[in-house]
Image (cartoon, rainbow, N blue to C red):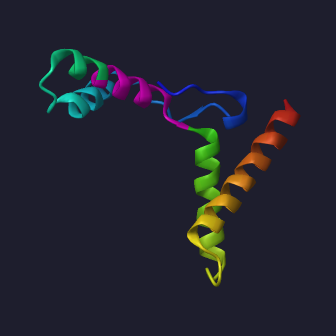
Amino acid sequence: MTTRNKQDGGSAFPVWDSTAMHRIGMAASQDIEDSAERDREYIRATAQAAQGMTLRDHFAGLAMQAYLSGHDRGEFSYEEWAKASYEMADALIKVREAKS
């Protein structure tokens, strides 16, 4: 299970519907024959779904979308755009935490 901390902003879009979580777990573990391994994968998949993505990842995705919709990619590599997106996400979280 992924550990969340204050630097990542916590969870964004967690799954609360138990039926949906069960379906996610079943889909992730359905092809595993060893029962212990299948149980571990089911638990991992449902726990991950319950947490959702981090707020940091969500903010970075929004920043990436804004960067790419407003600018020609030009000489920047995808890695440079991704790094800049996470830097923007980190700045958003820092300001958000300062307000609380």
**Which quadrant would residue 20 be assigned to in this image?**
top left
- Most common secondary structure along the magenta stretch: helix
What range of the chain is rendered magenta? 41-53
Q: Is residue 56 left or right of residue 17?
A: right
Question: What count of labels does the image hold?
Answer: 0
- Provide residue 14's location: percent of width, then percent of height: 49, 31
Q: Is 71 within the magenta? A: no
Residue 69 location in percent, x, y? 60, 74
36 or 47: nearer the eye?
Answer: 36
- In the depicted structure, whether residue 62 falls above or below residue 25: below
Question: Vertically, is 74 above or below 8?
Answer: below
Task: Classify residue 73 as left or right of residue 26.
Answer: right
Query: Image height check: is 82 above or below 53?
Result: below
Residue 13 pos. (x, y %)? 51, 36
Q: Is residue 84 above or below residue 50?
A: below
Residue at the (34%, 20%) spot, across then down = 43
Give the quarter of the figure containing the C terminus: top right
Between residues 62 and 33, which one lies in front from this camera angle? Answer: 33
Q: State the residue at coordinates (61%, 56%).
A: 62
Residue 8: image location, x then y, percent: 67, 36
Q: Which residue shows up at 66% across the image and 79% down it?
A: 71
Q: Residue at x 79, y 49 (%)?
A: 91
Q: Residue furthest right?
A: 98
Q: Is residue 43 magenta?
A: yes
